[in-house]
Image (cartoon, rainbow, N blue to C red):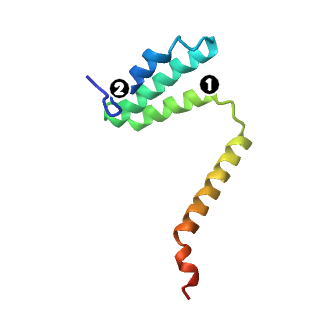
């Protein structure tokens, strides 16, 4: 049997939520999410390549996240800013050093 890095959580999510969302779009999204979780687990268990997992991520995002290039750029800028703020906190002790 393959997988196991996440204790087959994708199976439990599938059993509990797929076709139980009382909404056809959400049911479809949960099914797709479980496929993505499967691919993540199999990659982390060395049953799939990272490339296979990344292809699944792209497919999922294209279908479910209708983002524009501007949305992505804003997200990237926000992450840069957050990381910069974290690093500045980490090195706060250096501000008095000359």
**Neighbour tally class for label 2: few under 14, some 14-19, many 20 plus, Cα within 10 Å:** some
The reply to whether dot 1 and dot 2 touch (C-beta < 8 Å) is no
**Neighbour tally class for label 1: few under 14, some 14-19, many 20 plus, Cα within 10 Å:** few
Q: Residue furthest left?
A: 1
Q: Quadrant of the C terminus?
A: bottom right
Q: Earlier in the sequence, mark 1 or mark 2?
A: 2
User: Residue 58 is drawn in which quadrant?
Assistant: top right
Query: Relative to 76, does residue 31 appear above or below in the rendering?
Result: above
Q: Is residue 5 left or right of residue 60?
A: left
Q: Is residue 95 left or right of residue 1?
A: right
Q: What residue is disc 1 on?
A: 63
Tag 2's secondary structure? loop
Q: Return the residue nearer the eye: 19 or 49.
A: 19
Query: Relative to 20, does residue 92 appear above or below in the rendering?
Result: below
Q: How many marks?
A: 2
Q: Residue at x 39, y 26 (%)?
A: 9
Q: Residue at x 44, y 36 (%)?
A: 51
The mark found on residue 8 in the picture is 2
Q: Residue at x 67, y 43 (%)?
A: 72
Q: Is residue 84 left or right of residue 1?
A: right
Query: Foreground mark, 1 or 2?
Result: 2
Query: Relative to 19, does residue 67 appear above or below in the rendering?
Result: below
Q: Position of residue 37 (x, y in %)?
A: 44, 28
* Real-space Cα separation, disc 1 to disc 2, in angstroms: 24 Å
């Amino acid at each position: 049997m393959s997988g196991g890095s996440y204790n087959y959580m994708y199976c439990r999510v599938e059993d509990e939520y797929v076709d139980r969302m009382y909404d056809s779009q959400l049911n479809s999204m949960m099914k797709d999410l479980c496929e993505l979780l499967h691919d993540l687990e199999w990659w982390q268990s060395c049953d799939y390549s990272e490339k296979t997992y990344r292809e699944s991520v792209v497919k999922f995002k294209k279908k479910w996240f209708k983002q524009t290039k501007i949305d992505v750029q804003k997200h990237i800028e926000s992450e840069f800013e957050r990381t910069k703020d974290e690093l500045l906190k980490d090195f706060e002790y250096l501000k008095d050093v000359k």
